[in-house]
Image (tube, rainbow, N blue to C red):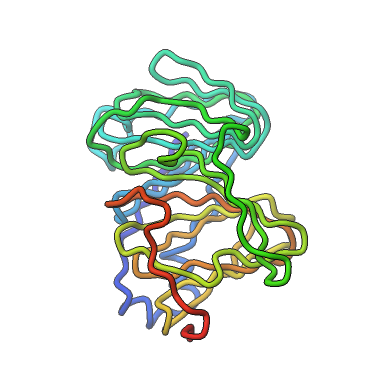
Amino acid sequence: MLTVQTRHAIHQDHAKGMDTAALRQHFLTENLFADGEIRLVYTHYDRFTMGAAVPAGGALTLDKVGETRTPSFLDRREMGIVNIGGAGTVAAAGEAYTMNTGDVLYLGMGSGAVTFAGAGRFYITSAPAHRTCPSRLVTVAQANEVNLGAPETANQRTIRQFIHPQVMDSCQLVLGYTTLHTGSIWNTMPPHTHDRRMEAYLYFGMTPQARVLHLMGEATETRHLFVANEQGVLSPPWSIHSGAGIGAYQFIWAMAGDNVDFTDMDMLDAGDLR
């Protein structure tokens, strides 16, 4: 079963006047993971698509998606898949890839139908592509690891870069995930923006009671979302993105736009936040 939801881009002036319900409607993605289903959110932020496939021991195939008006979803797109569940397999273009927990699979443009199977919980990201890059499975051990932050600022964290220029080639998709160390709660503080690309988050590895206070909006007009396990956030180019968690959490970050340079960001001073 495939379901697709469309999200239109929101201007920052519009976001200033939104109440809690409207903010959650436009920027929070809920209920992505459902047994026996593929659920996608097709956005008008750089035509980025996020979603999930949960085969639950069976098999699910993603092929034609009406919103793209192409015979197959990946005819003019690339895809990044993260397995946050048990062991599973993903098959595309005549190749089958075994994915363990934390592994990331990149599929280049023209890969055709994609079949998900096994006990995996597959988080899906996709962006339009103008050239075909080689498909590749990147294991946790093969990721580029960056350690940032410190215990005294409660933001000690490990960033693992998978679909990233230091690891592999892609067209415009950049993806990795961040794990907070024990006792640290803050991510991406002080925050930043990057006007040349949008970003999407998926928070995972949380208990049912835990929440992340996700900060968004312009630096002088901040807003917030309380986010639960396996929920996502769409972050427009004009918005900051930062958060603090109640308990342990991880988050997958994925970006699409003009620049694949991970360090291309406009840093903000925490003292300027309002």
Image position of 24 (left or right of 130)? right
Looking at the image, which residue is at 35% across and 48% down?
A: 260
Residue projecting furthest to the top:
94
Residue projecting furthest to the right:
183
Image position of 83 (left or right of 27)? right
Looking at the image, which residue is at 45% across and 71% down?
A: 23
Q: Work out whether 144 lies above or below 13.
A: above
The residue nearer to you, when weighing 225 against 201, is 201
Q: Work out whether 183 lies above or below 54.
A: below
The residue nearer to you, when weighing 66 against 50, is 50
Q: Work out whether 45 lies above or below 246.
A: above
Looking at the image, which residue is at 34% across and 53% down?
A: 43
Looking at the image, which residue is at 27% across and 52% down?
A: 258
Is residue 185 visible in the rendered structure shown here?
yes
Give coordinates of residue 265: x percent, y percent: 39, 63
Give coordinates of residue 226: x percent, y percent: 59, 69
Give coordinates of residue 172: x percent, y percent: 32, 43
Number of on-image labels: 0
Give coordinates of residue 273: x percent, y percent: 48, 83
